[in-house]
Image (cartoon, rainbow, N blue to C red):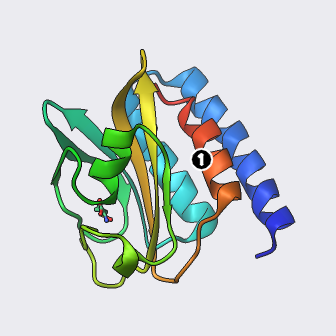
Amino acid sequence: MDSTEKQKKYENLIEQVKAFAESERDEIALMANVAAIIHETFHFWWTGFYRVVGQELVLGPFQGPVACTRIKFGRGVCGTAWKEKRSIVVEDVEEFPGHIACSSASRSEIVVPIFRDGEVVAELDIDSEKLATFDEIDKKYLEILTHHIY
Ligand code: SME
C-alpha cells in the first residue's frame, strides 16, 4: 500500500471513530469497536488496547490471537511507551530490548499511549507479522484517532 492510500484509509477511519465516539461514551465499548475497525481496515496481525489499572497495563478489547494480559510499567514496548509517555514505532521487535513476545509471529509493532489529564490511561498496540510495517504516517494518524477515545 502506498502512503497516499494509507493516509486516505486513516482519514476515513478517523471519521468513523469520531462517529462512534459521538454515539458511545463508554470507553471499553468504544475501544472494542475501534480495535475492530482498525483491524478490518488494515488486516494487521493484532490490534488492541491495554488499560492502566494500578501499576500495570491490563489487556482490553482486541482483535487477533490471544495476548499477554498484564504488562508492568517500563516493561516491553507497551510498558516503555507508558513510562516515556510517547508513541513508539518498532521496525523489528527482535531489536527492541525487553520486547514481550505475546505471539512469535509478530515482527513489528506500534504503541500509542492515550492520555487523560496528562497521564497515560490506556494504550493502543498494533502488531504486524511483517517487518517495518509502521512509520510516521501510522503514528500521526493513530495519535489523532486515539484522541477521540478518552
Ligand atoms: N509486544 C508488546 C506486548 C503486547 S503484545 O504485542 C499484544 C510489548 O513488548 O509490550
Judged from the image, the secondary structure of the residue bearing numbered disc 1 is helix
Left or right, 19 with respect to 44, comes to right
Within the image, what quadrant is residue 146 found in?
A: top right
Label 1 crowd (10 A; few <14 / some 14-19 / many >=20): many
Residue annotated with mark 1: 142
* Ligand 1 quadrant in view: bottom left
Counting the numbered discs, the total is 1
Quadrant of image for the N terminus: bottom right
Relative horizontal placement of residue 79, taking residue 41 as reference (left or right): left
The kind of residue on which mark 1 rests is: Leu
Q: Position of residue 32 (x, y in %)?
A: 40, 44
Residue found at the very far top of the displayed protein: 117
On-image quarter of the C terminus: top left
Q: Name the image quarter holding residue 122.
A: top left
Quadrant of residue 119 within the rendered picture = top left
Image location of residue 19, percent across then percent down: 65, 31
Q: Residue at x 52, y 62 (%)?
A: 39
Q: Is 62 situated above or below 30? A: below
